[in-house]
Each structure stands twice: as C-alpha cells, then as structure tokens.
Image: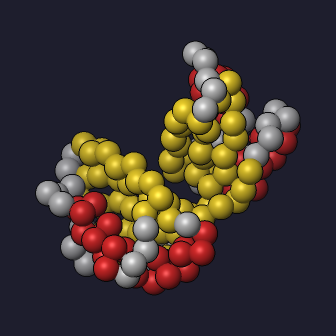
Amino acid sequence: MAETIQRVQYFYTEVSDKPGEGAKLLNMLKGEGINLLAFTGFPKGRRAQIDFIPADQAAFKAAAKKAKLKLVGPKSGFLIQGDDRVGAIAEFVSKLAEAKINVTAVNAVAAGFGRYGAILWVKPRDVKKAAQVLGASEAGQSQPQPS
C-alpha cells in the first residue's frame, strides 16, 4: 500500500512540566469522546507544549472550551502514514531539502503490522510549498502516494 500524506490542522497548549499533566488532558478528551490522529508533547523551558491533531476539529474545540483549555491554533502540519520500509522518512525529508524547505520537527514511529506513521512540521511560510512537494491532500481527502 502507498503512503497517504495529509495536510492537517493542529492545536497546542502549554502546561506545567510535571507528572500527570498530559494524562489529565488526554483523559478529559477521552471523556468527551475526542479521537486524535496524533498527539505529541515536549518540554519548553519550565513548561511543556502539548500538540493535538484532532480527527474532528469542531468537537475538539468544543471540548477544549468546556474544559477552559487555552489553545493556540489551528496551525498546519502533515500526517504521513504508510507501509514501513527502510528510509521511508528519509525520502520525504530529502524531497523537502531539495526544495529548500527546512523541517521544523518530525516524529515517526513504526505502528506494527508493517505500517508506520509520522507527523511533520515546517514553518508557516513553507506549508503551501511543502504540501505541493509532498503531494499532500487536505485532511479527510487522502491521496495515496506512490511508494
């Protein structure tokens, strides 16, 4: 199966960098029935930044509002899913490098059963060009990419 590359919208919040803060957010979203396509968290000074890529933006924003969660976004990124193979991510970051687009961050993981997934960010000024280079579709309109 070929890769699917989607341009997605993400939101982030900052929380205290201490045990349980991420669990609290994820459990709140679980309680509201919110499905996430991707989630990542990392330290940012004395705080932590938590990024969410929701399957349903409207439901996610409603749940965040109900929980009085301060969100930044939406911002754009890319969700990549496909059959796992040696060098899968290298191909995408190489295409972007050739187009003179700097990758801000990327998180990739083997998903088991021969599959992988990744989330990739570029600077806002480069999102449109990166979407063209990667052959990305808008979220919910996945286009398989040749392997």
For the N terminus, the image quarter is bottom left
- In the picture, measured across the screen, residue 73 lies left or right of residue 70, that is left
Residue 134, quarter of picture: bottom left
Q: Position of residue 90 (x, y in %)?
A: 24, 63
Residue at the image point whose x is 53% and y is 62% from the top: 77
Please tell me whether residue 65 is drawn above or below residue 134 in the rendered image. above
Q: How many marks are shown on the rendered structure?
A: 0
Nearest to the observer: residue 88 or residue 115 = 88
Please tell me whether residue 104 is drawn above or below residue 51 in the rendered image. below
Residue at the image point whose x is 36% and y is 74% from the top: 96
Nearest to the observer: residue 25 or residue 14 = 14
- In the picture, measured across the screen, residue 106 lies left or right of residue 68, that is left
Q: Position of residue 144 (x, y in %)?
A: 35, 75
Residue 138, quarter of picture: bottom right
Q: Position of residue 46 (x, y in %)?
A: 63, 27
The colouring scheme, among rainbow, by chain, secondary structure or one colour, is secondary structure
Q: Is residue 68 visible?
A: yes
Please tell me whether residue 11 is drawn above or below residue 101 in the rendered image. above
Residue 63, quarter of picture: top right
Residue at the image point whose x is 41% and y is 54% from the top: 106
Q: Position of residue 65 (x, y in %)?
A: 84, 42
